[in-house]
């Protein structure tokens, strides 16, 4: 097989590289040396709230000394990929954190932490709060992330940009540009 570029097929074998180490040894093991691959790629999928999880995963990878050579994603994964690629190595986690803090908000306001925390015992209450949060996002959007299209896409001309989705994510542009340093 012909090899080309930095990310050609790795020649190293996995015999000396155990990914099944005890939990307490994994972070130290990864920080000692780079995994035995010529190229490390990070592929991030879409799915709204999954993006915040992806930011945490990237932070853990960074702390372990694993820095991808390539990043790619779709939907919210593409947004996170742009922030990672658009920042120098030492600013990537900070850029992701700044972005996610900017676009996330407490649906009910900050008073809920003081008032509801003592009441949040049990699955029923947690499920209720999750439903309120999901319905709030569905009906009102998420500030700085997406907002519902009004009127409904069904009422717009066929083939127009407004008819292609129920939500408008154009507000996301101003938030993605700030943490990226292209």
Image (cartoon, rainbow, N blue to C red):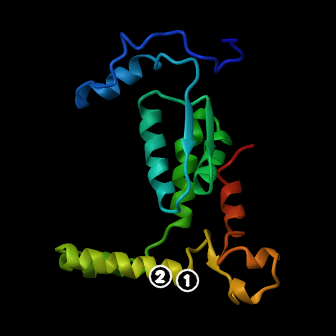
Q: What residue is shown with label 2? A: 136
Task: Check the picture and name the quadrant holding the C terminus.
Answer: top right
Asked if one can make out residue 36 in the rendered structure from this viewpoint, the answer is yes
**What's the residue at 61%, 28% (across, down)?**
69
Q: Position of residue 108 (x, y in %)?
A: 40, 82
Could you say which is closer to the camera, residue 59 or residue 69? 69
Q: Are marks 2 and 1 in contact (CB under 8 Å)?
A: yes
Is residue 109 visible in this depiction of the protein?
Answer: no
When asked about the image quadrant of residue 76, the answer is bottom right
Crowd rating for badge 2 (residues with CA inside 10 Å; few <14, some 14–19, many 20+): some
Task: Give the residue displayed 48% in from the left and 62% down from the top.
Answer: 49
Disc 1 element: helix
Residue highlighted by disc 1: 140
Tell me what residue is drawn at x 74 percent, y 90 percent: 155
Q: Nearer the viewer, residue 150 or 118?
A: 150
Q: What separation in Å lies between label 2 and label 1 (alpha carbons)? A: 6 Å
Dot 1, how many residues are within 10 Å of its Cα: few (below 14), some (14-19), or many (20+)?
A: some
- Which image quadrant: the N terminus? top right
Number of callouts in the render? Answer: 2
Q: What kind of element bears circle 2?
A: helix
Please report the residue visible at 46 percent of the width from the left and 27 percent of the height from the top: 65
Is 144 displayed left or right of 65 in the figure? right
């Amino acid at each position: 097989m012909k090899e080309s570029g930095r990310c050609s097929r790795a020649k190293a074998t996995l015999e000396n590289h155990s990914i099944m180490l005890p939990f307490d040894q994994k972070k130290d093991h990864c920080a000692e040396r780079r995994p035995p691959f010529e190229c490390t790629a990070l592929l991030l999928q879409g799915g709204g709230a999954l993006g915040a999880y992806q930011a945490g995963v990237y932070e853990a990878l960074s702390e372990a000394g694993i820095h991808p050579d390539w990043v790619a994603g779709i939907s919210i994964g593409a947004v996170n990929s742009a922030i990672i690629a658009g920042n120098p190595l030492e600013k990537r986690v900070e850029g992701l954190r700044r972005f996610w803090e900017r676009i996330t908000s407490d649906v009910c306001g900050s008073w809920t932490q003081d008032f509801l925390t003592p009441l949040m015992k049990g699955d029923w209450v947690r499920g209720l709060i999750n439903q309120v949060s999901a319905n709030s996002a569905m009906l009102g959007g998420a500030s700085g992330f997406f907002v519902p299209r009004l009127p409904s896409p069904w009422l717009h001309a066929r083939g127009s940009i407004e008819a292609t989705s129920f939500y408008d994510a154009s507000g996301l542009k101003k938030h993605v540009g700030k943490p990226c340093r292209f």
